[in-house]
Amino acid sequence: MPTTDRIAGLIDALDCSPWGASCGRTRRAHGSSRPLYTNEERRRRDASPWTVVQGVLAPLQFAVFLVSLALVTRYLLTGAGYEIATWSVVIKTLVLYAIMVTGCIWEKEVFGRWLFAPAFFWEDVFSMLVLALHTAYLGVVIAGIGDGRAQMLLALAAYAAYVFNAAQFLLKLRAARREDGRWQGGSHAAPGAAG
């Protein structure tokens, strides 16, 4: 079985979980749940330049994360490269701040809220934890709290939270694509329908 089929199977299994709102499930129970985007929100999403910005920053952040993870792991295993590992986490954190700020602007433009729009509520909640852990890392480095190993372990905790949060957003993107396919296929609600 190809890897993509295995991943799709795993995602489908998660899509049926009781935590559907946080994993991007848009399946309707008796037709009562709100779609991810209303027609107007979809129009604003597609017209927003911030959608493109998010589409660029997300893979950039992931690439920075992978490089930084390698450098942090190298330091933890060998004790070498503390400074470059530290700078890599600082850069990852700055990219995170950029994606958070632009994401808030995008959310305001599309949903009329800076944060915690119903469609992205749980993603935003967990993003706050990711942001807090990354900011705590900057704080301990600037204040010189703990040794390099303790600091890098905090960075790894921040990275673990980031991976979980990134998975939330990937599942939501997958749900949005499914919903867009149904919408384009003619099974969408009447124009202007609100949830």
Image: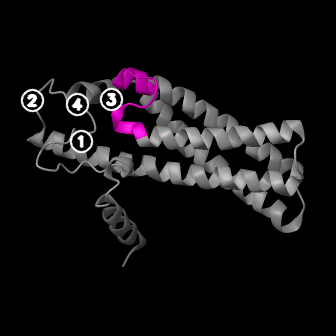
Dots 2, 3 in contact, CB < 8 A: no
Asked whether disc 4 touches disc 2, contact meaning CB atoms under 8 Å apart, the reply is no
Can you say whether 163 is above or below 103 in the image?
Answer: below
- Amino acid type shown at disc 4: Thr
Query: Which mark is first along the chain, 2 or 4?
Result: 4
Relative to 194, is 121 on the left or the right? right
What is the distance, in whole Å, between disc 3 and disc 4 at their CAs? Answer: 12 Å
Element under disc 1? helix
Whole-number angstrom distance, CA of label 1 to CA of label 3: 11 Å
Q: Mark 3 points at which residue?
A: 46
The C terminus - image quarter: top left
Judging by the rendered image, the residue that carries numbered circle 2 is 190
The residue to which callout 1 is attached is 180
Q: Nearer the viewer, mark 3 or mark 4?
A: 4
**Place of residue 130 in the rendered image (x, y in percent of width and height, measured from the top left):** 60, 43
Q: Which residue, given by chain and number where applicable, does mark 4 sit on?
A: 38
In the rendered image, residue 50, in percent from the top left (x then y), is placed at 45, 26
Colour mode of the rendering = one colour
